[in-house]
Amino acid sequence: MEHSLYIVPRWAGRPDTDFYSWLEARLLESPQGFSSVRALDMPNPSQPTIDAWVGTLAAAVGRTPSPSTVLMGHSVGCQTVIRYLATLPPGQVIDGVLLVAAWWDVDKPWESLVPWVETPVELERVRAAARKFVVLLSDNDPFTSDYARNQRLWEERLGATVLLAPGARHFNNPREPAVLEALRSHFGSDTNARK
């Protein structure tokens, strides 16, 4: 299956920040299952709102996304992805989700993050909307110090496969090989051949 990958950046992130451009180039130079990669330009990235960000993702992917779609969120982008999945019609299922530096709450949420932490999401609808959830965490993320609890919540709430990248902090480097490896090993063409 040839996947279309959509990337939702972190708080204050843009398509040209962090590892997004590098990841796109790496995936497209040897596609291994990815035919398109698009990092989204989110509105007002330093004041992200649930409605605006979920709406932007919905406009990019569509209300009825292709079954070959893979969504990747980074930090608050992860919350955007799961909240978008909760809006999909029953029976609409994408191939999978990679959530990088994902959280349900943060140690010291600032004002624009509070609604993301406090607004509930329909987990049953989220679980039903993707075949696979993969979460990539580090053991020293400055925003979620209790990574073991964070891991357990993703496993319990979404049945996610949780991968740990030691020392990766919040995955803000220009290159993040652990992200590339997670995409290739869980959504690349080799995994589909083995199914």
Image: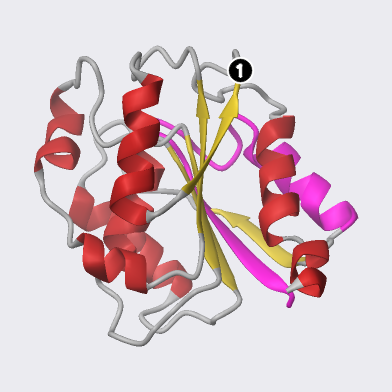
* Left or right of 135 in this view: 92: left
The vertical placement of 154 against 178, above or below, is below
Q: Is residue 163 magenta?
A: no
Tell me if I can see residue 11 in this picture.
no
Question: In which quadrant is the C terminus drawn?
Answer: bottom right
Q: Is residue 26 magenta?
A: yes
- Residue at the image position 25 percent from the left and 72 percent from the top: 87
Q: Give how far across and how far down residue 45 sits, in percent.
A: 35, 37
Question: Magenta residues, as a range?
Answer: 1-30
Q: Give how far across and how far down residue 61 sits, in percent.
A: 46, 71
Tell me if I can see residue 169 in this picture.
yes
Residue 15, by quadrant, is top right
- Residue at the image position 34 percent from the left and 73 percent from the top: 128
Residue toward you, 182 or 60: 182
Q: Give how far across and how far down residue 121 sits, in percent.
A: 17, 56
Residue toward you, 171 or 40: 171
